[in-house]
Image (cartoon, rainbow, N blue to C red):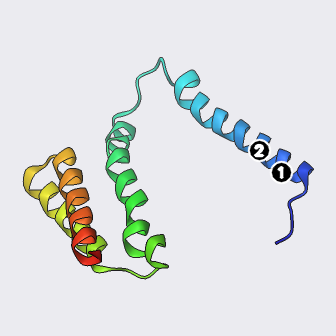
């Protein structure tokens, strides 16, 4: 693997910092004291709902722990999480049920 040039690395780091600051500043500094349009608020409501599945889906479908191949404990834990979330409409209960299922299945199948 070729080492990265220090100048290129610092340009990327500074560019990411400026981009991150600019993105936050737009919402907090420029728009923070104004009312947002209803259509934007309606779309922002779904942001949190989309983030957790986007973070978890790769860990279920291509888990690093199994070398990238799906396995039954993770798939069943995801299924239990979805079902409990749908039935109870409670994110915390769904995540606790999914985590409990995953650890229980990993313990039972490994031991």
Q: Quadrant for the C terminus, please.
A: bottom left
Please report the residue visible at 31 percent of the width from the left and 50 percent of the height from the top.
Answer: 49
Drawn side of residue 65 relative to residue 106, left or right: right
Q: Are marks 2 and 1 in contact (CB under 8 Å)?
A: yes
Please rate how many residues cluster around mark 1, counting C-alpha atoms within 10 Å: few if below 14, some from 14 to 19, many from 20: few
Q: Which residue is mark 1?
A: 9
Please report the residue visible at 43 percent of the width from the left and 82 percent of the height from the top.
Answer: 69
As measured in the structure, the alpha-carbon distance from the residue carrying label 2 to the one carrying label 1 is: 6 Å
Tell which residue pokes out farthest to the left in this image.
87
Tell which residue pokes out farthest to the top in this image.
33
**Residue 47 image position (x, y, % from top left):** 38, 46
SS assignment at label 2: helix
Residues 57 and 101: in front is: 101
Is 71 located above or below residue 50 in the figure?
below
Residues 107 and 14: in front is: 107
Residue 21 image label: none
Which corner quadrant of the image does residue 110 belong to? bottom left
Please rate how many residues cluster around mark 2, counting C-alpha atoms within 10 Å: few if below 14, some from 14 to 19, many from 20: few
Tell which residue pokes out farthest to the bottom in this image.
69
**Residue 59 image position (x, y, % from top left):** 41, 67
**Residue 93 image position (x, y, % from top left):** 16, 48
Is 53 located above or below residue 13 in the figure?
below
SS assignment at label 1: helix
Q: Which residue is mark 2?
A: 13
Which corner quadrant of the image does residue 16 belong to? top right
Q: Quadrant for the N terminus, please.
A: bottom right
């Amino acid at each position: 693997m070729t080492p990265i040039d220090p100048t290129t690395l610092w340009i990327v780091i500074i560019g990411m910092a400026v981009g991150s600051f600019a993105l936050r500043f737009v919402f907090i500094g420029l728009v923070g004291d104004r009312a947002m349009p209803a259509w934007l608020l309606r779309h922002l409501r779904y942001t949190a709902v989309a983030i957790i599945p986007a973070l978890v889906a790769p860990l279920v479908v291509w888990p690093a722990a199994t070398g990238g191949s799906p396995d039954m404990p993770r798939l069943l834990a995801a299924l239990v999480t979805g079902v409990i979330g749908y039935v109870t409409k409670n994110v915390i209960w769904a995540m606790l049920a999914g985590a409990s299922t995953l650890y229980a299945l990993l313990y039972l199948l490994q031991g």
